[in-house]
């Protein structure tokens, strides 16, 4: 197995192994590399759905994204099961366009995600890359004044909010994330439960910092994302079918890049649930949801 760090503060390309057939020593090295690099790229693995789920499951429980409890991988795709391509007015198309903003997965759920696995099935002729940004290195690069300013601050995370920002107004129950459990309140600085490294915990779902007026809050969160998500803290992956990537949602932001949405792009996604000890957050009423039924469960 070879682990070659990417020319950025995060990420490594891992070759010379089969993810579907790892012995204990190989798995241990992969897990260590995951904690060190936060994004691991495994070119050309061609995992079956079951193999991808088993790989994700090594990192923890699978977060249930689909209504069917047996379904542990979901398609992130603009192609419908009948082969046709989604139009711009469809709910799921608007969710895909939302993914083009920097975010971390499930920060809008009571229990934020630990990790995400993505594999490429069908890729467009151009564009459609995924990019990641290193929130550990971003925190390290902040000036002392900013670090002091954000030390005690938290933000609410809401998928209603982030989709509304791109003109997508959604009602509760319309899909995963559009719930009535309330908006989790999460500190802007997260300490990684394994490495102990501080990182910025921000992104498009974060808004409304208590103690700041809305304009101040929006400006601070926007400025932090702008500062954080730039070289040398970013990596952009141009997918080939069969590639597998896993990233650490606790310290990395990601986004999809646009492509010609008349072409098909089919990705298979498996999400690893966070640890309630470190990824569970209290929630407060999220106005667009209408009702507020607090819960510590994502389901
Ligand atoms: Fe995502």
Image (cartoon, grey):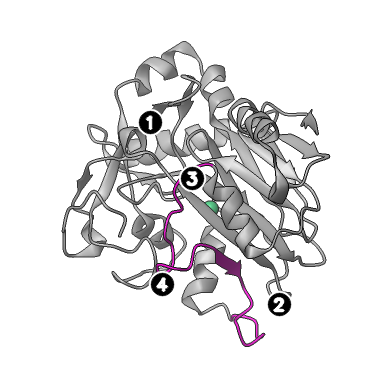
Q: Identify the secondary structure beneath mark 2.
A: loop
Q: Report if residue 81 lies within the magenta region.
A: yes
Q: Which residue is mark 3?
A: 104
Which mark's residue is nearer the viewer, 2 or 3?
3
The CB of the residue at mark 3 lies under 8 Å from ligand 1 = yes
User: Counting residues from the N terminus, which is met first, the one under dot 2 or under dot 4?
Assistant: 4
Question: Can you see residue 68?
Answer: yes
Whether 9 is drawn above or below 114: the answer is above
Quadrant location of the C terminus in the rendered image? bottom left
- Tell me the CA gap for discs 2 and 3: 26 Å
> What x and y, as percent, mark residue 39?
64, 37
Which comes before the other along the chain, label 3 or label 1? 3
Residue situated furthest top in the rendering: 144
Disc nearer the start of the sequence (3/4): 4
- Judge left or right: residue 123 versus residue 282: right
Q: Secondary structure at mark 3?
A: loop
Q: Nearer the viewer, mark 4 or mark 1?
A: 4
Q: What residue did someone put label 2 on?
A: 262
Disc 4 to disc 1, C-alpha distance: 33 Å
Q: Give the distance between the C-alpha atoms of the residues marked 1 and 2, in whole angstroms.
A: 37 Å
């Amino acid at each position: 197995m070879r682990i070659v760090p990417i020319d950025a503060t995060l990420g490594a390309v891992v070759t010379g192994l089969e993810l579907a057939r790892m012995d204990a020593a190989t798995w241990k090295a992969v897990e260590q590399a995951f904690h060190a690099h936060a994004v691991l790229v495994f070119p050309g693995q061609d995992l079956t759905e079951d193999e991808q789920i088993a790989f994700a499951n090594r990192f923890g429980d699978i977060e249930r994204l689909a209504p069917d409890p047996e379904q542990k991988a979901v398609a992130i795709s603009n192609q419908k099961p009948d082969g046709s391509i989604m139009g711009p007015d469809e709910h799921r198309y608007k969710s895909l366009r939302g993914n083009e903003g920097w975010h971390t997965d499930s920060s809008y759920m009571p229990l934020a995600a630990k990790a995400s696995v993505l594999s490429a099935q069908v890729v467009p002729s151009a564009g459609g890359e995924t990019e990641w940004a290193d929130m550990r290195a971003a925190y390290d690069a902040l000036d002392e004044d900013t670090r002091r300013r954000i030390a005690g601050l938290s933000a609410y995370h809401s998928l209603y909010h982030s989709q509304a920002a791109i003109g997508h107004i959604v009602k509760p129950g319309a899909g995963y994330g559009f719930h009535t459990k309330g908006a989790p309140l999460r500190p802007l600085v997260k300490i990684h439960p394994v490495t102990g490294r501080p990182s910025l915990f921000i992104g498009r779902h974060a808004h409304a910092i208590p103690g700041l007026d809305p304009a101040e809050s929006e400006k601070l969160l926007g400025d932090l994302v702008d500062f954080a998500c730039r070289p040398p803290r970013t990596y952009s992956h141009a997918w080939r079918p069969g590639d597998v990537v896993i990233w650490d949602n606790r310290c990395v932001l990601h986004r999809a890049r646009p492509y010609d949405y008349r072409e098909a792009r089919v990705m298979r996604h498996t999400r690893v649930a966070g640890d309630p000890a470190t990824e569970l957050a209290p929630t407060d009423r999220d106005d667009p949801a209408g009702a507020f039924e607090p819960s510590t469960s994502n389901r």
